[in-house]
Amino acid sequence: MLNERRRWPFAAEIALSVVAGAAAFALSAMICTAARGHVPPVVLGLALLAGVLALARAAGILYALPVGVAAIQAYDWFFLPPLRDFDDSALTLIALFIVMAVIVGAVATAAGRRAVESERARGDLLREQVALRRVATLVAGGAQPDAVFAAIADELAGLIGADASFMTRLNDAPGSDPPGSGAPGSGAPGSDAPGSDAPSRGAPGSASPGSDAPSSGDPGSASPGSEPVGGGSQGASVTVVGSFGVREMSIGTTMALEKSMVMWRVATTGEPVQTRGDELRDGPFGKIIEELGIRMVVAAPVMVGARRWGVVVAGTRQESFPADTESRIGDFIHLAALAIANAQAVEQLRRLAEEQASLRRLALLVAQGVAPELIFSAVTKEVMRHFGSGTARMIRYELDGTATLLANEGTTGPHVRVGGQWEAYPTTGITATIQRTGQPARVHDYRELPGGEKYAREGLVWAVGMPIHANGRLWGMIAVGSGEGRIPDDLEARMADFTELVAIAVANAQSRAELISSRARIVAAADDARRRIERDLHDGAQQRLVALALRLRSASIRVEQGDDVHEEITAVAADILVVIDELRELSRGIHPAVLSDSGLRPALRALGRRSPVPVEIDVRIEGRLPEPVEIGAYYVVSEVLTNAVKHGNASVVEVDAEAADGVLRLRIRDDGRGGADPSRGSGLLGLKDRIEALGGTFELDSPAGAGTTITCRVPLDEEPDR
């Protein structure tokens, strides 16, 4: 109907109703004149009323009212006696009647149309609210995001009367690099299997600040089994998350965006777009459009907060959508975005809860002191469960530059040997990149990687590797990979907690091993010291004392016989003094008297005086230090001086000691041949154990041919006496 279609502006319709009234008066006058005397008045009056009613139903009151008034005036003037002459006054009168009727009709029509539009708006709002309630019910019920997105696509189609609709999520929002332009290197040269190799290609969060790992954009290619729709060059892409009436747009379908796509225009401009006709049929979805019989498509952006989240597309088999379809889609999607945000928040909380539960289980294993191999296996399983649908691997970097595969979950192949060396990985891949930079690395597509064919044969497409740092050095890496979808933007951040836990386990295991070794060395050193004291007493003072006892017994026998034993007694007394000197010298090795009596400064100077090589001593210590610290420092200097003479062939030794800021700093340097190795039993391990037992640090720098420098830092439990 005309009042529903509103083909013309309202002012034009008013003018048309005036013309219709004038035409109706002229036509009715001719009919009444011709029918006068031939047709009964009642019949003609009913015929005129029927025509007015038909016009009212067809065109509305705006046209029916002036036409009815004009027809009744013509019936009165030209059919019913007395007849009237059609002069200027009659013309003025009929014009007034028609104008009055048009005014009344226009007011009534405007009010009616406003009422209809208001009722329609209320109906649309009610339908939107009902649709949103159904979506919100899914969210509140803990439905998966895929179910929520599918429900939004269904409800939108029903709301606007679309024959097909689908919702997509932007994988890479087009911006400075338009979709289809092909960001450099979207594939990932240098990638191999997870835990194997693939350098980062610049996906968000792929490397920490300062990372040297290569980077590039996501190629946006389809996952295996989900061929990209419409071809497309590498660049931004979208993934279908909800679909209605389009089998070809199944959930999970990934497609690269092209400039010819409606979605590309929406993604770049953030504004709704309509298209129809040849433009629609000639586009990348022409075949699908033709099969569905779609004649018009409307696409609109989906904004979640301030972020351009995705694009929604709706099509109809009608000639066009109603004029307000774009605004209605925008209103519905604006409200649906809240449901999308809530669904994602619920999913993130669920995922976070599961990850925290996994971290608690692993932390319990670490706290229980479980063997590192079991922890590595458990961590790899948890990482696989949360982050990779293909594989998860843990690799350790050895000191000789090689790598060892410690654990593997998921895909495998002839090159995967747990406990064996991880070999033949590309020099630009994940393993080599992390080993070189110490930063996260990622790969987007193994199939584009030279040397990555064996990992692609495992069914892997992408991978992310995270470094593991333990005790201040790069210990290894853990990597995940998959053959489905694309790399999540926040994957590195989510994996960080697991790599930190592995680092703690590694540090604990190393500390435990060092503690066990240290205890064994301390016991062995104590046994050696006891045996040395026993040997020194037995071979020295004990034998001399036995000999002196025998001589004194012999002298007593000679006294009984009346012999002169004065010289013998004098000799024995001299030997006793020698024994006393030997015992005093032996006691110095155990605990020198000068250290107990005078402190560290005089004790170090005494060591320097007794040394066979020149010793330059600079001691900046006032008063006394805690006794354990003095003893530890004394024996470090004593042992290092001995090593410099016996093993280093040094010509001079420098000793520097300073107590300041609650720390004793001790530095001993010689100009000998260097090359000292604690593992060769030079006594350095014992010194390291002694200093670390005091809570200090022991550092050795002994390059071959350049002398040896030992630096110790020992905290002072109490301030030195002033």
Image (spheres, rainbow, N blue to C red):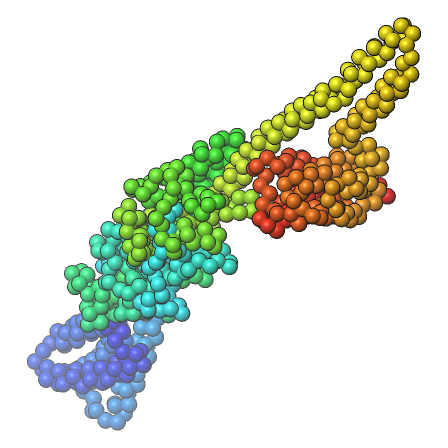
Residue sitting nearer the eye, 202 or 167:
202
The residue lying furthest to the left in this view is 38
Residue at image location 91% in from the left, 12% down from the top: 564
Residue at image location 75% in from the left, 18% down from the top: 543
Residue at image location 82% in from the left, 27% down from the top: 581
In the picture provided, is 283 more to the left or to the right than 682?
left
Measuring from the top left, give residue 511's x and y in whole percent.
57, 36
Residue sitting nearer the eye, 598 or 317:
598
Measuring from the top left, give residue 121's x and y in whole percent.
35, 63
- Does the rendering let one see residue 635? yes
Residue sitting nearer the eye, 300 or 431:
431
Against 431, residue 589 (above or below) is above
Residue 664 lies in quadrant:
top right
Residue at image location 35% in from the left, 69% down from the top: 178
Against 677, residue 518 (above or below) is above
In the picture provided, is 577 more to the left or to the right than 40?
right
Measuring from the top left, give residue 337's x and y in whole percent.
40, 57
Q: Which quadrant is home to the N terminus? A: bottom left
Residue 98 lies in quadrant:
bottom left
* Number of marks drawn: 0
- Does the rendering let one see residue 342? no
Measuring from the top left, give residue 353's x and y in whole percent.
46, 41
